[in-house]
Image (tube, rainbow, N blue to C red):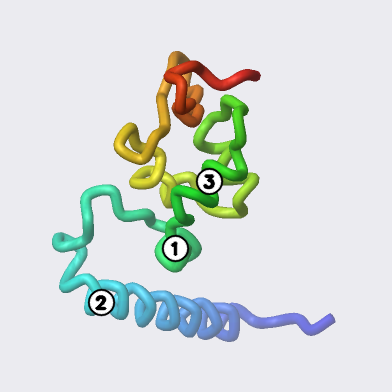
């Protein structure tokens, strides 16, 4: 095990800070400044890079089950914020009490548990 002196630790911390500062500046350039980021922009790099799944993919995965957004995201391997624009009434999803979401059935019925 190598023992580092305080000057070496400080130098390493500065190098890490420089790396993260460069990444933050790149994000600001990409979005034209943090003031121009979308209002519900995800803050994690994974969420920024994760494309929203297709409506059909989510419907096939859910089937006739009722699920919560976090569980749907976990099953798809995505952050929950990616699903906000997909899980809408216009796309055939119904939001019920306590966060339950299900696919609207053709006959107007509800999903089963």
> What residue is shown with label 3?
58
Q: Is residue 96 above or below residue 56?
A: above
Tell me, for residue 51, which label it has, or none. Answer: 1
Residue 95 lies, with reference to residue 40, above or below; the image says above
Residue 12 in the image, given as x and y percentages of width and height: 55, 82
Between circles 3 and 1, the one closer to the viewer is 3
The residue wearing badge 2 is: 30
Left or right: 35 with respect to 74? left
Looking at the image, which residue sits at the far right? 1
Q: Residues within 10 Å of mark 1 (few under 14, many from 20)?
A: few
- Residue displayed at 48% across by 45% down: 80
User: Which image quarter: residue 45?
Assistant: bottom left
- Residue 20 spot, x, y in % from top left: 42, 75
Distance CA(mark 1)–CA(mark 2): 17 Å
The quadrant where residue 112 appears: top right
- Residue 24: percent from the left, percent from the top? 33, 73
Pick the residue in front: 6 or 1. Answer: 1
Residue at horizontal 55 percent and vertical 45 percent from the top: 73
Residue at disc 3, secondary structure? helix
Label 1 vs 2, first from the N-terminus: 2
Check the image and report above or below for 41 versus 51. above
């Amino acid at each position: 095990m190598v023992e580092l002196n305080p000057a070496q630790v400080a130098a390493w911390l500065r190098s890490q800070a420089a790396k993260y500062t460069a990444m933050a500046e790149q994000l600001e350039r990409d979005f034209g400044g943090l003031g121009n980021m979308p209002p519900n922009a995800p803050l994690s790099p994974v969420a920024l890079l994760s494309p929203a799944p297709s409506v059909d993919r989510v419907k096939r995965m859910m089937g006739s089950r009722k699920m919560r957004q976090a569980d749907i995201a976990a099953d798809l391997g995505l952050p929950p914020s990616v699903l906000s624009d997909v899980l809408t009434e216009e796309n055939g999803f119904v939001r019920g009490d306590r966060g339950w979401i299900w696919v609207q059935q053709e006959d107007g019925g509800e999903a089963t548990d």
